[in-house]
Image: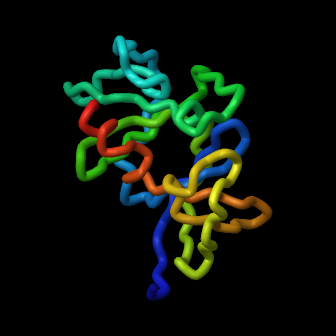
Amino acid sequence: MENREFKILIFSINGIYYATDIMNVERILGYETTTQIPDSPEFIEGVINYEGKILPIINLAKRFNLRGEITTSDSKIIVSNQKHGKYGMIVDLVSEVKDVNTDMMEEAPEVIGGISRRYLKGLVKIEDKIVITLDLEKILTEQEKDLL
């Protein structure tokens, strides 16, 4: 893999730092209460109206089975634009955008903090933090994408 630079958006959930390629991010919204959808998977918080369309909202803490997820008015929604459409992800805090290099990224272990490797692109060390880089294309399975 050739060495290239790209920008990541760093955010946190339950005090753990995550990131995603900024190219997958369309916008960051303030938190708003979602409308619940009956019979949806537990990690689907509900839907909101975004630019006149219905936007499904994923609670990443529930998706990754992280304990103690509490959504507050300070939470943010990251709107991700994927091949199959858009969805929002609830995070506690959006911290910064950073330039990273592919050679800074390390392979993720099989399971890190209870999160399966299929969601991960790798780990990046930034200053004194280890940032878990997520592959947003893989947050949802094909069945879940069809469901949404």
Q: Residue furthest bottom?
A: 2
Rendered location of residue 121, percent (x, y) = 52, 63
Instruction: Tell which of 127 and 19 is nearer to you.
Output: 19
Rendered location of residue 108, percent (x, y) = 62, 65
Q: Residue furthest right?
A: 128
Q: Which corner quadrant of the image does residue 28 belong to? A: top left
Q: Is residue 69 above or below residue 9?
A: above
Residue in the picture at 70% in, 48% down: 113
Rendered location of residue 11, percent (x, y) = 59, 47
Rendered location of residue 82, percent (x, y) = 29, 50
Q: Residue furthest left?
A: 52
Residue in the picture at 50% in, 53% down: 119
Left or right of residue 136: residue 73: right
Residue in the picture at 70% in, 30% down: 67
Q: Which corner quadrant of the image does residue 32 belong to? A: top left
Q: Is residue 139 above or below residue 67?
A: below
Instruction: Tell which of 51 and 34 is nearer to you.
Output: 34
Quarter holding the N terminus?
A: bottom left
Instruction: Tell which of 59 and 114 is nearer to you.
Output: 114
Residue in the picture at 75% in, 59% down: 129
Left or right of residue 49: residue 6: right
- Marks counted in the figure total 0
Left or right of residue 65: residue 84: left
Name the image colouring.
Answer: rainbow
Quarter holding the C terminus?
A: top left
Q: Is residue 106 above or below residue 139?
A: below
